Image (tube, rainbow, N blue to C red):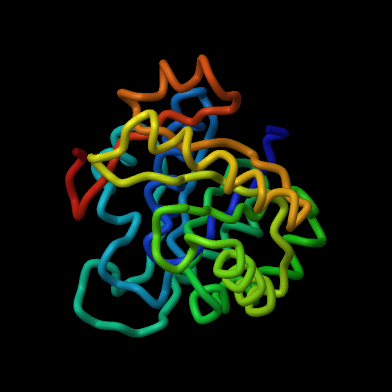
Amino acid sequence: MNLKRVTLFSGHYGSGKTNVAVNYALNLAKSGKKVSIYDLDIVNPYFRTVDAENQLVKNGVELIVSPFAETNVDIPAMNASSYKMVDDLSGYAVVDLGGDDRGALALGRFSDRLKEENNYDLLLVVNKYRPETRDLEGVLQIKKEIEYASRMKFTGIVNNSNLGVETTEETIINSLDFIEQVSKETGLPVVFTAVRDDLAKNISKKIQNVLPIDLIKYGSWL
């Protein structure tokens, strides 16, 4: 993967984009990069990057979230600090973008600046085992909605096909043909496959570009 200054993760609710974004940010930080993670998921207040705040802070990752994160207030508000994403070019930015067209609207206010700098990736996170994206038509519809709302085009795909703690090596291997079909239909490369940490070593012997991840669930790491 050609590392860009800004990496944005989006996909349908349940795709695991938040978990992928958090682990990606941690991976950058552990390699010595200056990293901030931005939670632009202004629609869904129940599962946010703030759930992993302790782990992020421990590893030196700056967390920027809505002022209403981890509350029951469902207001599409955005922290003014979010503009640091396009104002401060000295560090890496990882963005957890809301799923579907409503969530993607948050990116619209930054799209012109991001395209002007031209140092970003917008990655479509796909979980083959979620009902809304279990077929090609569903994935293409989500892609279309997010691109239209955000006024940006996806640059790659993340295969995050999993069944949570029930995921096995076979679960991941069985997703590869589908993800390759999505890649061919969209013309987008598969940037990496996210694999639970305990499975990643063996899977790496079978496929390339594996990102080992830990699972987060509502404030704790599994």
Residue 172 image offset from top left, x and y in percent: 44, 36
Foreground pick, 208 / 117? 208
Q: Which of the image's four quarters has the C terminus?
A: top left
| Relative side of 39 to 53, left or right | right
Report the side of 90 relative to 45 (left or right).
right
Relative to 166, say whether 99 is above or below. Answer: below
- Which residue is depicted at the point 73% across and 64% down? 153
Q: Where residue 77 appears, x then y in whole percent?
A: 41, 80
Q: Quadrant of residue 176?
A: top right
Q: Nearer the viewer, residue 148 or 88?
A: 148
**Which quadrant holds residue 142?**
bottom right
Q: Is residue 80 above or below residue 160?
A: below
Q: Quadrant of the N terminus?
A: top right
Please say if 50 is above or below 208.
Answer: below
Give the residue at x 59% y 57%: 85
Residue 30, given in percent of the width and then of the height, sits at 44, 25
User: Horizontal and vertical percent for residue 84?
Assistant: 57, 58
Residue drawn at x 26%, y 45% is 216
Exactly how many numbered labels are in the figure?
0
Vertical placement of residue 111 versus 105, above or below: above
